[in-house]
Amino acid sequence: MRFRYNIPLYRNLVALLFLFLVAGCLTSPNPFYQEKDVVQDSRFIGTFVSDDSGLTVTISSDGVPDKHYSVQLTEGGKASNYRATLFRLKDSLFVDLIPTDEKKIDEQYKEGAPTASGLLRYLSHDGKVRSSTRLHVLLRLSFTDNGIECFGAKKADDPSNPITKDSTFKLHSNGDGVVLEEPTETLRSIIERYAGANWGELFQNNSFKLTRRSEGPNQSHDVGATTNASH
C-alpha cells in the first residue's frame, strides 16, 4: 500500500516533514541492535514537543526493563506507546522502537490524512489494522542543546537507497518504507555499514526536531552515555 498525502489537509509543514521522514523508516521483526551496542543517556528522558504540530513525546525509564525506555506519542487526543532502546554503532546514535500496546491503528491512521503518530503505528504493525504484527522501527538520533533531532531512512523507491538496491537482502516494501526480514546480526552489520561517516547513504539529510519542555530526573549523562550530537 502506498501512502497518499493530501497536502492541503496539512496546514503545518513541520508535521508534514515528520510524515515524510517516518514514511521511509526501516522496520524489522527483529531488533536492530545487540546488547553490547546499547547505551543510556539521561538527555533522552523528559517531555518533548514538535513546535506547532501538536505532537508530544514523553520518554521515561520508569516501569521498563533496565537499559530501555518507555515512549508515548500523544497527538489529537490519541496516544501510542512504545519501548525504546538507544544504541550506538561507530559514532552514530540510533533508537529502536517497538509498539507495546494492543490498540487498533485505524483510529489514528486515516488514508489521505495520517497523523504523525498514526503513521508510525501503521508502519510498526506492517500496515495491518490490528496489532498482531509488531515491528521494530529504526531512527537515527542526535541530541541538540534544547532537544532531539530524528532522521528517517530513505524511502523504498529512492534510487539512492542502498538497501533496496541490494538484491541479497530479504525484504519487502511497507508502503514507502522497507521491512528487513533478516536476523539481528545481519541487521546490525547492515546499519553499521551505513553508520559513522557513511550515514548519509541510507538516512535522510532532513531531520525532525523535538524541543524539550520538561527534563528528566537527572540531566547529567549516565555511565556509558552517548556524547553530544554527532553524525
Image (tube, helix red, strand yellow):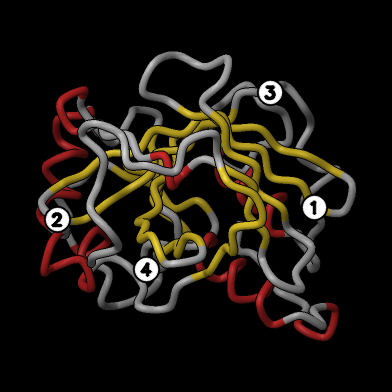
In the rendered image, the residue lying farthest to the right is: 77
Viewer-side label of 3, 4: 3
Q: Is residue 73 left or right of residue 136?
A: right
Q: Is residue 31 left or right of residue 219?
A: left
Q: Amino acid at mark 1?
A: Glu
* Position in image of residue 37 (x %, y %): 18, 33
Q: Quadrant of the N terminus?
A: bottom right
Could you say which is closer to the camera, residue 179 or residue 124?
124
Q: Amino acid at mark 3?
A: Asp
Q: Which of the marked residues, 4 or 2, is nearer the chain's N terminus?
A: 2
**Cβ atoms at labels 1 and 4 below 8 Å apart:** no
Viewer-side label of 3, 1: 1
The residue that label 1 is drawn on is 75
**Cβ atoms at labels 3 and 4 below 8 Å apart:** no
The residue that label 3 is drawn on is 101
Q: Which of the marked residues, 1 or 4, is nearer the chain's N terminus?
A: 1
Decide: few, some or many residues near mark 3? Use Cα within 10 Å; few <14, some 14-19, many ≥20.
Answer: few
Q: Secondary structure at mark 3?
A: loop
Give the spatial CA distance, label 1 vs label 4.
25 Å
The residue that label 2 is drawn on is 91
Q: Quadrant of the C terminus?
A: bottom left
**Cβ atoms at labels 3 and 1 below 8 Å apart:** no
Question: Taking 124 as reference, is 223 above or below it?
Answer: above
Decide: few, some or many residues near mark 2? Use Cα within 10 Å; few <14, some 14-19, many ≥20.
Answer: some
Viewer-side label of 2, 3: 2
Question: Taking 206 as reference, is 155 above or below it?
Answer: above
Q: Which of the marked residues, 2 or 1, is nearer the chain's N terminus?
A: 1
The residue that label 4 is drawn on is 154
Q: Which of the marked residues, 3 or 1, is nearer the chain's N terminus?
A: 1
Give the spatial CA distance, label 3 vs label 4.
27 Å
Residue at 45% across / 72% down in the picture? 207
